[in-house]
Amino acid sequence: MKAIVLGLDGGRRGEVELPEQFNEEYRPDIIRRAYHAEATARLQPKGIFLLAGLQTTARYYGRRHAWRQTINTGRSRLPREKIPGGGTGRVRIVPHARSGRRAHPPKAEKNLRERINFKENNKAIRSALAATANATLVKARGHVFERAAPIVVENALEEIKRTKDAKRVLSALGVKGDLERAESARKKRSGRARLRKGGYRTPKSVLIVFGEDKGIWHAVRNLPGVDACRVDKLNAELLAPGGDAGRLAILTENAVARLKENGLFS
């Protein structure tokens, strides 16, 4: 499979043979599993203090005719505090009582991580890479572009250091519509979700894959929905956000060469 190499002005510079990673079979099931493995790796176990709600003098006094007994006194037979003078105070310990324990607290030993085998993860990355070259899958994700997928650009793209220059080049490469789509669809999260990730939800746009970072990462990091990644750091979460493959990708010649020479993810 060959791809056209474009210049920073959008003009044709030649052709390049895509490496064998782009010939992988499309496996959405493995891609989604690899995505969940990446996403759940960020989850942190949480639990409660084991003695929460139990550090009290309260206990249940239920023996008939015993000191502080609560039978036949017109009160609920529940754990109550000891108070001076031999009486009983407020209900404690039980979940429905004030300052009581939680009925079903989060447990730190709960397994939150979904794991995936090394070879299976590599297969998922290869499959997601191949999906970036399938225009039908890329358009199904909602991306707007004017070129053939994937877009391969000359290595000068890696040397861009300013955001305005990056926007100009991306527009010349035919992905201006996709940048506008991500920016216009950025919306405020509702409810308590406003406290998460800055309070906004931004659709994913272009993924820029480079061989060596000479400034491109800083140039595009503030563009809505745009991600930039070194080719050997690719994962299923970048190539298939949400587990859906077919992300619009822009690769530099250097990135394509490293995929082929180093046999990454093979």
Image (tube, rainbow, N blue to C red):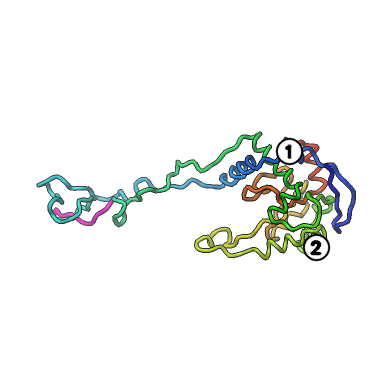
In percent of width and height, residue 256 lies at: 80, 43
| Label at residue 168 | 2
| Region in magenta | 85-93
Instruction: Determine crowd level at label 2: few under 14, some 14-19, many 20+ residues with C-alpha closer than 10 A.
Output: few
Front one among 209 and 130:
130
Q: Which residue is mark 1?
A: 24
In percent of width and height, residue 4 lies at: 85, 49
In percent of width and height, residue 35 lies at: 62, 45
Look at the image and tell me in which quarter the C terminus lies.
top right
| Residue at the spot 42% in from the left edge and 47% down from the top edge | 106
Mark 1: secondary structure = loop
Which quarter of the figure has residue 182? bottom right
Q: Answer left or right for 127 relative to 101.
A: right
Look at the image and tell me in which quarter the N terminus lies.
top right
Mark 2: secondary structure = helix
| Residue at the spot 46% in from the left edge and 47% down from the top edge | 46
